Image (spheres, rainbow, N blue to C red):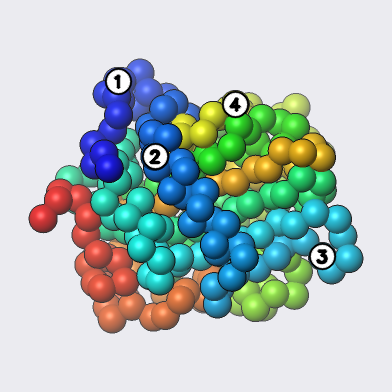
Amino acid sequence: MNRLPLRPITEAEKRDYERDGVINLAGMFDAEWVERLRAAIQRDMDDPGPMATNFNAEGTPGRFFGDMFMWTRDPDFRAVFVESAGPAIAAQMMGATKVNVFYDQLFAKEPGTAKPTPWHQDQPYWAVKGWQVTTLWIALDTIDKDNGAVEFVAGSHKWDRWFRPVAFKEGNHNDARYQKSSYELVPDIESERAKYDIKWFRQEPGDCLVFHSMIMHGAPGNATMSRRRRGLALRYTGDDVVYDPREGTFQMVREPEIPAGAAMDCELFPKVWPRA
């Protein structure tokens, strides 16, 4: 398995990420990784982990499956998170000299799933503080607007505004936690789309989006009747990030053994770059 990017990341791609908060890096994970991850995803969907969720409301068509922290119990999810080119890509895009894993997350929208992903920022959900926080979102299918490509408000990572986390499913175990957040409500981007520079990217299997934790993003449902939309999100942190267990953040698989304000160096958030 490749532990370095399959191709060089260009300076133009780094500049686009810095300016827009998001970039699609084509061809970063080879066919072997794609097939390995597809198999791991199917295992998880067939036998969901303790943090798995169907974000669809009961009785609605399709299935919007999500899971988190799979790497803590599955060797294939661990391998891509820790041993693949992921940490090296994150280091280059963040400009970081040190990279720690934060957590991994699976999003699978099956054909005919109308449920959208609400507009949100990521970092308000998370017990972390710092600028070098990024996600690699690996496509496991051909993805376009028809089957639910993620959309981004370009440049919104630099708004210097924090928005209250929005529950992907009302009434789930995190919904009450998010109500304790003191941040402002998310603006109604969907009804005022013309006001914003909204970008989306067609992806092929093995491409990965890289996006900043503060960028506003969301996704439509999967309007197709035959095409899946599976994406694996790998969350990484860099040099300046510390643990920040404030009110209003999501429930993690377990609490880390570090105090508030500490660097993200522990068994739950191990350092993965530079390689040991």
Crowd rating for badge 2 (residues with CA inside 10 Å; few <14, some 14–19, many 20+): few
As drawn, which residue projects farthest toward the left? 276
Cα gap from disc 3 to disc 4, whole angstroms = 28 Å
Which badge, 2 or 4, comes first in the chain's sequence? 2
- Mark on residue 57? 3
Res 195 → quadrant = top right
Which quadrant is home to the N terminus?
top left
User: In this picture, is 198 found above or below 126?
Assistant: above
Mark 1 or mark 2: which is in front? 2
- Mark on residue 11? 1
For disc 4, the marked residue is 202
For disc 2, the marked residue is 32
Cα gap from disc 2 to disc 3, whole angstroms = 35 Å
Amino acid of disc 1: Glu
Residue at x-position 40% and y-position 42%: 33
Q: Position of residue 126 (x, y in %)?
A: 47, 64
Res 27 → quadrant = top left
Cα gap from disc 4 to disc 1, whole angstroms = 21 Å
